[in-house]
Image (tube, helix red, strand yellow):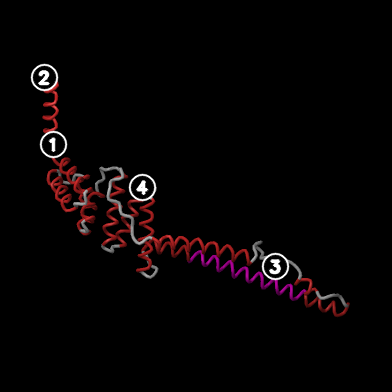
Amino acid sequence: MYRFLYIVLLLAAGSVTAQQLPERSEVRKGNRQFNKGNYERSIERYERALSAAPGQFEATYDLGNALYKAERFDRAEQTMRQAAADTLRSENERAEAFYNLGNAQFKQQKYKEALESYKQSLRLNPSDMEAKYNYAYTKRLLDEQNGGGGGDDQQDQQDQQNQQDQNQQGGEDQQQGDQQEQQDDQQQGQDEQQGQDDQSGQPDKEDEQAEGQPQQAEAGISEQEQQQMLDAIQAQEDRTQEKLKEKQGVVVRGKKNW
């Protein structure tokens, strides 16, 4: 008798909770449809949840994912933007919303907007490797689309590269000037020595120089070593670009990661 009464009370309490929070029931039903691949049905459930509780984060986030899966990218973008703007949620939750917002924008070829969304996601969750990849992949597409001009970040990178090129060129010019000066000094010494050899009959120093060690730059690094360093840097850059080319799109996540 007491056990039966206890079960009845639990059922009654559950019924009251369901009536008070109908959006949770609708979200669970939507999740079941989503997991089955019935995205349009899951959209209906999430929309019912939002009708009962406008702005509810979980329903908004899940609706954005379902819209994305249904390839309704414009609405997915609008919905996920609302989820990302919810400052009452945790940083990890908002990072996921910005991540999926970027994916919805990417599908619409809004690469500049997608890049900014991935950047916002990384600010909230800097350790997200997939977000880092999506950012790098989108940035490469932007660079190709703009002919090397990818916005402020691209300009900063280009400025840094230009500065490096100038420094490198300056170093090469300085090195060439030093080498030329050193060669001129050697030539002058050889000419003087040649004159002495002609008078004294001593062997030509030019033959001895040819048998000596390769000439070193004043910085202590030979031209061969410098070229090897440049080759290694270029090889690393080529490997990075090849890794990006192996991927054919951004990484999509549909499930919650919190």
Name the N-terminal-most of marks 2 and 1.
2
Is there a contact, CB below 8 Å, between mark 1 and mark 4?
no
Front one among 16 and 56 = 16
Q: Residues within 10 Å of mark 4 (few under 14, many from 20)?
A: some
Q: Position of residue 233 (x, y in %)?
A: 53, 62
Instruction: Check disc 1 and report its element: helix, strand or loop.
Output: helix
Q: Which of the two marks, 2 or 3, is nearer to us in this view?
A: 2
Residue type marked 3: Gln
Q: Nearer the viewer, residue 83 or 29?
A: 29
- Identify the residue at horizontal 17%, vertical 49% (top origin): 42
Residue linked to disc 2 = 1
Of badges 3 and 1, nearer the viewer stands 1
The residue shown at (70%, 67%) is 214
Q: Which residues are magenta?
A: 162-189
Amino acid, disc 2:
Met
Q: Within the magenta stretch, is there residue 3?
A: no
Proximity of marks 2 and 3: CB atoms separated by less than 8 Å:
no
